[in-house]
Every structure is written in C-alpha cells, then in structure tokens.
Image: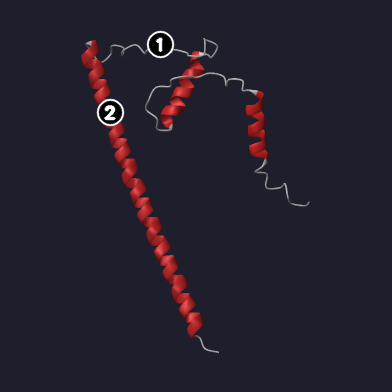
Amino acid sequence: MTLEPVLFSLKVYGLVIVISFFCAAVIRLIVLVLSSQAERSRAREAARDAAGAGARAGGPDAPGPAAAPAVCCAGGDIPPEHVAIIAAAVHALGFDGPVVQISEPRPREGWVSAGRFALHSSHNVFKGRQR
C-alpha cells in the first residue's frame, strides 16, 4: 500500500482548514468594520438631533417637539400602543413608509375559503405516504 493517497487527502484537508479560517477572519473583520461604522453613524445622528433640538427650543434642556398623535385606521378598536408597536416592527424590517391600514381581516366568501383549503391541502406531503 502506498501512502500517496493518504498524504494527498491530508494536504487537501489541511488546505480546507486554512481556507475556512481565512474566510472566518475576513467575515469577522467585515462585521467589526460595519458595526463600528454603525456606532459612529448613530453617535453623529444623536449629536445632530441634540444640537437641532437645542437650537429649535432655545436651549439644551428644553423639551423636544411633541410627537404626532397616533391615528388608528380600524375605527378606533385597536389601542394606540399596538399601532405604535406595529409601526416600529415595520420600520425595523426596513420599510420606511407609513403604516397605511391596520385592520381585522375581512370575512371571505365561502368559495374563496374552500378554494384556499383545497389548494393548501393539495400540498400535503404526508398524503400519499403509508404510515
């Protein structure tokens, strides 16, 4: 038996390990750079907001502008706190536009729900499998 295939596989294994560690180091460096940039950006925005609020209100200790009242589109049956939480969650997902409507789902026609049920039940992966 020759040792060439064993040595070749060990070389390949070692090369894969080195490349994996190099990729992990590059990813870690990218994460560090991006997080430091985000922290600097947040600090700049906070400083700009503090300076703007102090200039608008006449001093750094003056209260900031009043928040806009929460408007509920569902006839007032959703508490304003829930609207604020939903708007914050939408903003956290990256959508910067306003929340246009928050309401209960409309009741559907019978044939719509029957068709939806038929479609969803047709995707049942356990349907043809014998247990």
Label 2: few (<14), some or many (≥20) within 10 Å?
few
Q: Position of residue 6 (x, y in %)?
A: 51, 81
Q: Quadrant of the N terminus?
A: bottom right
Residue drawn 52% across the image and 88% down it: 2
Please determine whether, in this image, residue 127 is positioned above or below residue 56.
Answer: below
- Total count of labels: 2
Towards the viewer: 39 or 109: 109
Circle nearer the N terminus (1, 2): 2
Q: Element type at marker 2? A: helix
Residue drawn 43% across the image and 20% down it: 100
Label 1: few (<14), some or many (≥20) within 10 Å?
few
Q: Which mark is residue 80?
A: none
Q: Element type at marker 1? A: loop
Towards the viewer: 1 or 68: 68
The residue sitting at the bottom extreme is 1
Of badges 1 and 2, nearer the viewer stands: 1
Whole-Å distance between the Cαs marked 1 and 2? Answer: 24 Å
Please determine whether, in this image, residue 6 is positioned above or below residue 65.
Answer: below
Residue drawn 26% across the image and 21% down it: 50
Q: Position of residue 126 (x, y in %)?
A: 71, 47
Q: Position of residue 37 (x, y in %)?
A: 29, 40
The residue sitting at the front extreme is 111
Query: In the rendered view, does 1 fall on the left or right side of 53?
Result: right
Contact between labelled residues 2 and 1, with CB atoms less than 8 Å apart? no
Task: Look at the image and name its color scheme.
Answer: secondary structure
Judging by the rendered image, the residue that carries numbered circle 2 is 45
The three-letter amino acid code for the residue at tag 1 is Pro
Judging by the rendered image, the residue that carries numbered circle 1 is 69
The residue sitting at the right extreme is 131
The three-letter amino acid code for the residue at tag 2 is Glu
Q: Position of residue 40 (x, y in %)?
A: 28, 36
Q: Image quarter for residue 104?
A: top right
